[in-house]
């Protein structure tokens, strides 16, 4: 029998028009190079990993209970925010009246790196910025894998959403991630007329605005000579919400994320119920001979340990690397990454969404390129490819959700 919430939601006709057999599904274009029958969540250990997450989803969809929070950690595939934003939009629009967050956002232009241009940051003050790819010296990184820092006593960041986005995101609360390692910081927000003080937390500041807005300016008043470090900002809805936060840095590996010492502290502010770990592509780009499975697994374990220190029963989905070529040849390290992911999932009680298998395995990136799903670098995907993958992951999670019993 189907999960209780899905049963009642279907009976009450609350699910989207794309629902199939009582579970919302996205219609996807058919490509001969895609193994659609393999689009499932695998459970190498047991299925209990997702039970509490699905129960919270029941409560949200049926009774507008507490927010449900999904966090995705990744590399360039996720930083581009095509895959993640498609997932975010799929979840936000699956039921009328849900709230949702635009994500955990960072002024990527400060770090001279790319981002989804449907939001924008402006700033005042003299800022520096960096990522976990090459480190930031004595500046400690947190949940976004990026940091911007300033010694300007008066600085600000202005966030504007909905620049061409088809979905209109609004927020009445802000969660600001940051700290001063050598001084004090006063934080407040202006939303076009009123001023809201930031309430200090272990991860930064919480700010409650006077109304729902699409743009806000956050000011930082730092004590003389002190440094302020900004890690990210999550705009939150006043409605019960299904939130999807993506935290990603292009080029990052598992090691890159291990060297973010404030990751665990700041992850508390995202209150994760499900974490999707999409790492392995850059670990495997060293090639089969140089790839060290045990080192990869040790770094992965550290990331999972930090997640579970925040939420001991947080659900986990691991995603192996997609197929990539190395110097024009099939990269057999992709197979080793996939094997390591399944071993980790069995050990740590996680599910696996096997994108590598859905693609068709080693060497298929060429056929994905011919179909217009992968780019000419044979590593990254096109917008069409990333959106297809997001729809497939959404469908796989929803089918697993509907397969529960009551």
Image (spheres, grey):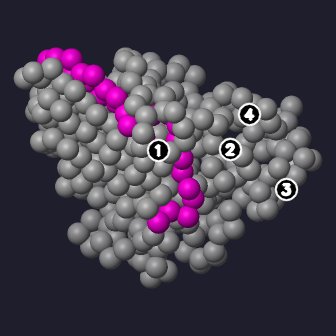
Q: Disc 4 marks which residue?
A: 64
Q: Which of 240 and 54 is in front in this view?
A: 240
**Mark 4 closeness class: few <14, some 14–19, many ≥20 residues within 10 Å:** some
* Residue 173 x %, y %: 50, 33
Which tag is nearer the camera, tag 2 or tag 3? 2
Q: Disc 2 marks which residue?
A: 98
The answer to whether residue 316 is visible is no
First of labels 1, 2 by sequence position = 2
Q: Work out which residue is located at the far bottom of the displayed protein and give it.
A: 370
Marks 1/4: CA–CA distance: 20 Å
Decide whether residue 174 is among the magenta residues.
Answer: yes
Residue at the image point whose x is 70% and y is 52% from the top:
94
First of labels 4, 3 by sequence position = 3
**Quadrant where the N terminus is found in the figure:** top right
Q: Disc 1 marks which residue?
A: 103
What residue range appears in magenta?
164-191
First of labels 1, 4 by sequence position = 4
Residue 21 is labelled as 3
Marks 2/4: CA–CA distance: 8 Å
* Residue 101 x %, y %: 53, 43
């Amino acid at each position: 029998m189907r999960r209780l919430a899905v049963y009642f939601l279907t009976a009450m006709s609350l699910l989207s028009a794309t629902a199939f057999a009582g579970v919302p599904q996205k219609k996807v274009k058919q490509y001969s190079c895609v193994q659609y029958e393999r689009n499932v969540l695998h459970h190498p250990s047991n299925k209990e990993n997702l039970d509490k997450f699905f129960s919270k989803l029941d409560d949200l969809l049926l009774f507008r209970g507490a927010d449900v929070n999904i966090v995705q950690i990744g590399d360039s595939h996720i930083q581009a925010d095509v895959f993640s934003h498609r997932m975010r939009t799929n979840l936000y629009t699956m039921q009328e009246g849900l709230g949702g967050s635009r994500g955990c956002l960072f002024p990527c232009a400060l770090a001279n790196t790319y981002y989804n241009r449907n939001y924008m940051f402006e700033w005042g003050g003299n800022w520096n910025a960096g990522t976990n790819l090459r480190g930031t010296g004595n500046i400690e990184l947190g949940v976004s894998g990026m940091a911007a820092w300033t010694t300007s006593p008066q600085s600000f960041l202005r966030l504007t959403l909905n620049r061409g986005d088809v979905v209109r995101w609004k927020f009445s609360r802000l969660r600001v991630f940051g700290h001063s390692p050598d001084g004090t910081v006063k934080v407040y927000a202006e939303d076009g007329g009123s001023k809201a003080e930031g309430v200090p937390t272990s991860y930064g500041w919480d700010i409650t605005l006077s109304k729902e807005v699409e743009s806000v300016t956050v000011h930082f008043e730092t004590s003389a000579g002190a440094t302020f470090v900004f890690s990210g900002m999550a705009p939150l809805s006043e409605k019960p919400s299904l939130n999807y936060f993506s935290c990603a840095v292009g080029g990052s590996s598992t090691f890159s994320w291990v060297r973010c010492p404030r990751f665990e502290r700041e992850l508390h502010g995202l209150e994760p119920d499900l974490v999707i770990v999409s790492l392995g592509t850059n670990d495997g780009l060293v090639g089969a001979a140089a790839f060290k499975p045990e080192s990869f697994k040790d770094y992965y374990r550290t990331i999972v340990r930090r997640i579970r220190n925040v939420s001991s029963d947080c659900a986990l989905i691991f995603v192996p690397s997609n197929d990539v070529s190395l110097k024009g040849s099939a990269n057999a390290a992709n197979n080793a990454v996939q094997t390591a992911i399944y071993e980790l999932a069995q050990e740590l009680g996680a599910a696996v969404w096997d994108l590598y298998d859905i693609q068709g395995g080693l060497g298929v990136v060429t056929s994905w390129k011919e179909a217009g799903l992968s780019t000419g670098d044979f590593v990254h995907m096109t917008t069409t490819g990333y959106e297809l993958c997001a729809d497939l992951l959404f469908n796989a999670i929803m089918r697993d959700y509907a397969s529960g019993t009551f």
